[in-house]
Image: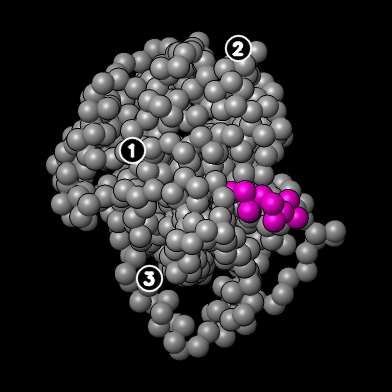
Amino acid sequence: MNPLHQRSSGVLLHITSLPGPHGMGDFGPAAHHFVDWLASAGQTLWQLLPTTPIGPGDSPYQGVSAFAGSQWMVALEPLIAKGWLAAPDLPGGGFDPLHVHYGDVLPWREQQLRTAAAGFAALATPTDRLAFTRWCQAQSDWLDDYALFMAIRSPLQGQPWWEWDPALARREPAALARAREDHGDEFNFWRFVQWQFDVQAAELKAYANSKGVAIMGDLPIFVAHDSADCWARPDLYYLDEHFQPTVVAGVPPDDLGPLGQRWGNPLYRWDRMAAEDYAWWTARVRRALSQADVFRIDHFRGFAGYYEIPASSPDAKTGRWLPGPGKALFDAIEKALGQLPIVAEDLGFITEDVHELRLACGFPGMKILQFGFGADGQHEFLPQMWSRECVAYTGTHDNDTVRGWWLNASPRERAFAGAYLPCNEHDVHWAMIRACCNSVANMAVFPMQDVLGLGSAHRMNVPGVLGGNWGWRFTWEMVDSETTRVLGLISAASGRAPLALMGLPG
């Protein structure tokens, strides 16, 4: 399914935000129920945040692998159904249904996964063992490095790979062979968890597609320094002889911050990637397309030009712009994989070369309606200025909720939005959803928080703030029949859902 070139609408909700008894959302029954709800509300797209393992601050944008799936999204119910895991006892009082408390949830979930892996080793049928073996063989190009990385890392309590025994950090073949033998059980545990991630993700995608709902993934442009990717191929990054970055990623100072943003990710050696015909990126996109029908690439501007910050600099004030790989990268990927269903995140400081690259690749960009009320009626983020080839958002995971935005906006912005939409505090979320749906944009997407009309306390992320983010969850009690009905009516009236949702003949 590819919704990019047809009128469609959908909801942005991360897997971890789903309801469920086990401390955080996962691929379990609530995910399938959410698909049913989307279909009942006339929605044909479910947009996720990255499903790769989380990193510092619980962020899904700083994971230890660009290829692996987050072990925390593996649902326990299918493992129980297989007989590999007994129904677990929840900690006293159960988990918070409205927020993911990662410090409490993750150790508990890891123990359940380890028990399930032991149950598989002891009780699996020959059919399941064969399926596991064949899957491991099919995914070995990334899986073996990731599983060994995690196996070595586990007893070292997360010690970064460049501080490991030098023979392991340098990936000397004899040292790798010894590590795989010494950590055989742990190696197999991480392979088992990834197998179950893939099985459950594939089942959810197939179920969504059967209901007419496409899955939209999210691909961060950079990888973390302390990652299986850097350890496996340090030659593809600007690292010194001690495997430390010489330059790092970020963006320069702007109106939002006098110091800019120093992200700290190692930068790609695009020359070396080009010499391999961008094989690493082709493999990464192939993996993304196995899990989603379409995906967003975060920080798309970095492919046209990227900002290089000396690793010694404490902030992003010192840096320079350098050319990215440009269209050659996407030509190489498309030659290998065919037409690419990609949405380009083209927000922030965007120069003409970024627009030219996006248009040359044929990728739609993003328009955020919240951003449209700071100037006049010709602002690029107002619907009358959009083209069909874009994805319209009320906001993203990095924005305040629409209700929160209204309460925190300047009096001028609030007056402009109130006249333009028109609306007030109580219905601004529906007014923005309606404006996105009634626009010419082929796709319209709304965070679940905006569909529910929630305030700032429910936002997903505050950029630049470490801690307290990524934990929001909802419960089904928050989703009443009127919310479902109104979302369906707006989508149908704007040509994004069947007229039957309005009680009219098709």
From what the image shows, is residue 186 above or below residue 103? below
Q: Is residue 89 above or below residue 477?
A: below
Residue 362 image offset from top left, x and y in percent: 24, 40
Horizontal side of 87 relative to 12 (left or right) equals: right
- In what quadrant of the picture does the C terminus appear? bottom left
Report the predominant secondary structure element of the magenta stretch: helix
Name the quadrant of the N terminus: bottom left
Furthest-right residue in view? 93
Which mark sits nearer the N-terminus, 2 or 3? 3
Q: Residue 22: give x, y in percent of width and height.
A: 70, 61
Label ID, residue 315: none
Give the alpha-carbon distance from disc 1 to disc 2, as whole Å.
29 Å
SS state under label 3: helix
The residue carrying mark 1 is: 388
In whole angstroms, how far apart are the C-alphas of marks 2 and 3? 58 Å
Helix or strand or loop: what does disc 2 sit on? Answer: helix
Q: Which residues are magenta?
A: 477-487
Query: What residue is shown with label 2?
Result: 412
Q: Which mark is residue 136?
A: 3
Depth-wise, is mark 2 or mark 3 nearer the camera? Answer: 2
